[in-house]
Amino acid sequence: MNVAIIGAGPLGRWLALAAARAGFQVQLEDVMPANLHHAQEYIRREYSHTDAVKYVSTIEDAVRSADLVIDCVPDELESKLEIFCLLDRMAPPHTIIATPTIHLSIADLASCTYRADKCVGIVVDARQFAEAIPPGALTLRTGPQTSSATVEVAGMFWRSLGFEPQFEPDPVA
């Protein structure tokens, strides 16, 4: 499975490393060259198979062959809506979009796409998650249109990273 991670800040680079270690091919994108450089140094220090992560500077390059995209943009409505619209337009139709969020409704975010059945929320404070919280329970939030196939793929991804995903419906939906 190909995983695209949008944003190479602390959360993005941690996810890229974890996904690469789990055997996924990873495309890590950031518009800031310094963030990509820091991510590359971090991953090089922590993992010897550096060819498992490709560093790209455009969303289009990151998502071109992605099966799963995880955005690591700030948990603010405008930022999330913008990235969801871009991902929906640029990613292949089968691509699942996942986003870490505490306060935003995955149903509302998914409604701005043509793939509401392929959207899932990761209920986590990105700042805490980036500090390498040990694997354990992780809540994934589904919208009313999220498909069982999306739940299956998202669950498999997080289990392969050592988490025990629990699914709950979006309370706002």
Image (cartoon, grey):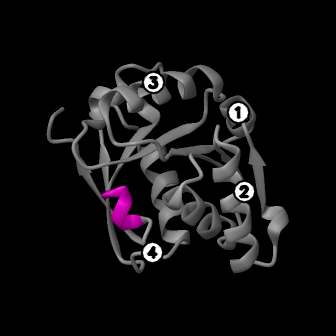
- Kindly indicate whether the residue at mark 1 contacts the one at mark 2 (C-beta within 8 angstroms): no
User: Given the image, on which type of amino acid does mark 3 rest?
Assistant: Glu
Label 2: few (<14), some or many (≥20) within 10 Å? some
- Kindly indicate whether the residue at mark 4 contacts the one at mark 2 (C-beta within 8 angstroms): no
Using the image as rendered, state which of residue 165 and residue 49 is in the foreground: 49
Horizontal side, residue 27 vs residue 84: left or right = right
Q: Main secondary structure of the magenta part?
A: helix
- Calculate the distance from the C-alpha at mark 2 to the C-alpha at mark 1: 15 Å
Residue under label 3 = 82
Q: Which mark is residue 58?
A: 1
Q: How many marks?
A: 4
Label 1: few (<14), some or many (≥20) within 10 Å? few
Using the image as rendered, state which of residue 127 and residue 15 is in the foreground: 127
Residue 112 appears in which quarter of the rendering?
Answer: top left
SS category of the residue bearing label 4: loop
User: Given the image, on which type of amino acid does mark 1 rest?
Assistant: Thr
Label 3: few (<14), some or many (≥20) within 10 Å? few
Q: Position of residue 50 (x, y in %)?
A: 81, 68
SS category of the residue bearing label 1: loop
Horizontal side, residue 138 vs residue 132: left or right = left
Label 4: few (<14), some or many (≥20) within 10 Å? few
Residue under label 2 = 37
Magenta-drawn segment: 124-129
Image height check: is 130 above or below 162? above
